Image (cartoon, helix red, strand yellow):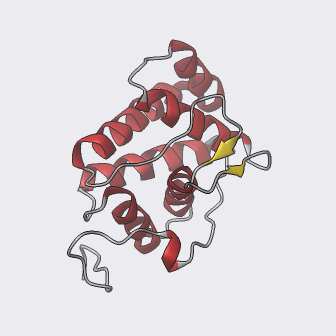
Amino acid sequence: MQDLKPHDDLLHGERLLIRTVRLLALASPCHSLKAHFEDACGCAGQSAYRMLEAFVQQLGLRGRRRVTLSIPADPRLTDDEALILDAFGCAQAEDYRSLDERLTGLLGVPPPFAVGAAACTVAETLALNGLMLRARPAPDAFIPQAWGQDACLRMAAE
């Protein structure tokens, strides 16, 4: 059973991000969300929205585990949604090792470059427009391990 947490304490950028991820995962384009991104991020909003689309598509295509999302109007977060928000928070904080760990946990395999690049682009666009995301400390038990992955996660530069 998924542990659902209320997200009343989410910042505006976090609410925008999680609601958009939920709707994109349903494969139902919502043109008003593009408008929300453009309103929140100005001329960079459309690019951020497209990169978030790419992120969700890559989760579906490259992922080796099922990611649990709530319906768009649900005020609670699943563990996977909290992990998604944490991944974007790590990207915004430029904590790339933690970002790789979170993405590996979400996908079940080491993330392809496009997933990390999309997360970093969206997070940076939100930050440049004053929409901050929090990187929450996640215990190791909260981050699912990838299949056949050693306990030690290596970065591409190592």
Report how many numbered discs are placed on residues in the image: 0
Foreground: 89 or 82? 82
Q: Residue furthest top?
A: 31
Q: Residue at x 28, y 59 (%)?
A: 111
Q: Residue at x 43, y 37 (%)?
A: 52
Quadrant where the N terminus sits is: bottom right
Whether 11 is drawn above or below 38: the answer is: below
Whether 52 is drawn above or below 155: the answer is: above
Residue 47 x %, y %: 43, 30
Residue 37 x %, y %: 57, 27
Image check: 38 left or right of 96?
right
Q: Residue at x 46, y 30 (%)?
A: 49
Q: Residue furthest left?
A: 148
Whether 136 is drawn above or below 74: the answer is: below
Quadrant where the C terminus sits is: bottom left
Residue 22 x %, y %: 51, 34
Picture quarter containing residue 126?
A: top right
Picture quarter containing residue 2?
A: bottom right
Image check: 111 left or right of 98?
left
Image check: 11 left or right of 111?
right
Image check: 49 left or right of 2?
left
Residue 146 x %, y %: 29, 69
Q: Residue furthest front?
A: 1
Foreground: 39 or 43? 39
